[in-house]
Amino acid sequence: MTPSDVKATLSFSDGSPSIDLPLYKGSIGPDVIDIRKLYGQTGKFTYDPGFLSTASCASTITYIDGDKGELLYRGYPIEQLAQQCDFLEVCYLLIYGELPNTEQRTTFTKTITYHTMVNEQMQFFLRGFRRDAHPMAVLTGLVGALSAFYHDSTDVQNARHREIAAHRLIAKMPTLVAMAYKYGMGQPYMYPRNDLSYSANFMRMMFATPCEDYKPNDVLVRAIDRIFILHADHEQNASTSTVRLCGSSGTNPFAAIAAGVACLWGPAHGGANEACLNMLEDIQRMGGVEKIGEFVKQVKDKNSSVKLMGFGHRVYKNYDPRAKLMRETCHEVLGALGLGNDPLFKLAMALEKIALEDDYFVSRKLYPNVDYYSGIVQRAIGVPVSLFTAVFALARTVGWIAQLNEMIGDPEYKIGRPRQLFVGSARRDVKPVAQR
Ligand code: ACO
């Protein structure tokens, strides 16, 4: 961290002595005020529920400029990565810090490919779930269970263990997501195939059956690969912070990633793509494009809890760059499948246009986020709505593991332990039950 020449001075209106707080400069983005010694020097905590103004760590992985609508992985713009790299190259970049050269790419792809099978016993573990369980419930269990199957890579203090766990997680997530899907469908699991690319292999495990040959469609494989790239990391969001906090206790990487999966499930985070598609389907049932005005009115009504899902973001106060790329992919996929007139896509575009012109959304800087179009793409590919967040979890796993490894390797890392502003009862005595 680079110290700044500037210092922040904190003064108090009650005459308590003021203190100087050091500032650090990032390579880009806002400076931070170092408050680590604040409690020791003043006996006071800072109060920031939701981390609106708090940097929880220093990181070199992902940078977002929310006002510009810019997303960089290790300095590379998401647009260039989405157009020029495949998902495994992006995984390599996130984990190791640089894009791979030809030899590194080949070796890494081979390593991941040869870790895609899961322990056969996982099938029996999966069978304990009800067939109608939500895939995210199943995935949370399966990922957590990996620590029970792969004991030789659970020492988080051992860099080689962490690397093997990273490879295993990236490799096995598609297999687990496809297994969760097949289980819900009552179909046999399809084993991974080492002659296919990462994304083609995922599609085959999802959509093939043992009854006939399956050839993944190139346009759809590219679309899935792009979904993976766009969701691979997003700095210190809720699930990533969960993984870091969980991992800060020294727990094993599989357990920490399972915590991330659980956090991602929520509709304000990864569950938004599922919620967005459900919302579009509801509007379609109500009467489609004609009913957009009525729906938008509900969204703007402070007494209703209706939100325009797929819109708004804690950090982006501009168009989410991933949403633009996803919109492009949406056109490609619907074109390739002859679904150019898909009513849901038309509805999404009409709703987006109206929202972008409406003062409610404009004044609050609410723009489409990545989830707005990713649901339509996944639905067109044949991914069921209930599996959308599991696909997101698959893609985000590399980000989670890269962030976890960065934290463990950081000499300043400590167990995460936020403090609180206590507003409950002061000390009081327990009365006998008859007097309460
Ligand atoms: N629809 C309607 N109003 C909204 C929406 C929305 N989608 N998002 C924010 N607002 C309004 C809020 O009601 C608030 O209005 P107010 O100032 O009149 O009270 C204002 O905009 C600011 O919103 P906050 O909730 O303070 O913003 P915050 O940063 O806390 O929330 C969030 C961000 C959770 C993403 C929110 O925009 C939201 O719920 N969006 C819909 C869910 C969604 O798409 N989530 C995906 C996020 S991206 C991802 O995880 C990949």
Image: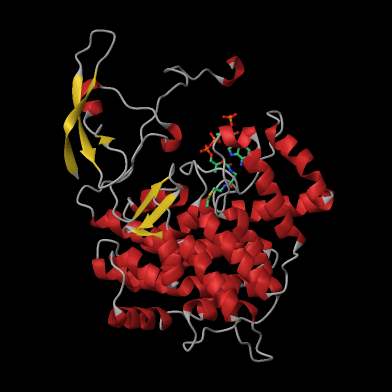
Dividing the image into 4 quarters, which one contains the N terminus? top left
Q: Quadrant of residue 7?
A: top left
Left or right: residue 168 versus residue 57 is right
Dividing the image into 4 quarters, which one contains the C terminus? top right
Left or right: residue 14 versus residue 221 is left
- Residue 326: image location, x then y, percent: 56, 61
- Residue 216: image location, x then y, percent: 60, 83
Q: Residue at x 80, y 51 (%)?
A: 288
Q: Nearer the viewer, residue 30 or 390?
A: 30
- Residue 46: image location, x then y, percent: 34, 27
- Toward the bottom, the furthest residue is 212
Q: Residue at x 51, y 71 (%)?
A: 225
Q: Quadrant of residue 218?
A: bottom right
Q: Residue at x 73, y 69 (%)?
A: 339
Q: Nearer the viewer, residue 150 or 172?
A: 172
**Residue 136 visible in image:** no
Q: Nearer the viewer, residue 427 or 298?
A: 298
- Residue 156: image location, x then y, percent: 30, 62
Ligand 1 located in image quadrant: top right
Q: Quadrant of residue 100?
A: bottom left
Left or right: residue 421 versus residue 160 is right
In the rendered image, the vertical position of residue 237 relative to residue 141, given as above or below: above
In the rendered image, the vertical position of residue 106 relative to residue 357, given as above or below: below
Q: Residue at x 56, y 70 (%)?
A: 223
The number of discs equals: 0
Q: Nearer the viewer, residue 404 or 7?
A: 7
Left or right: residue 85 versus residue 184 is left
**Residue 425 visible in image:** yes
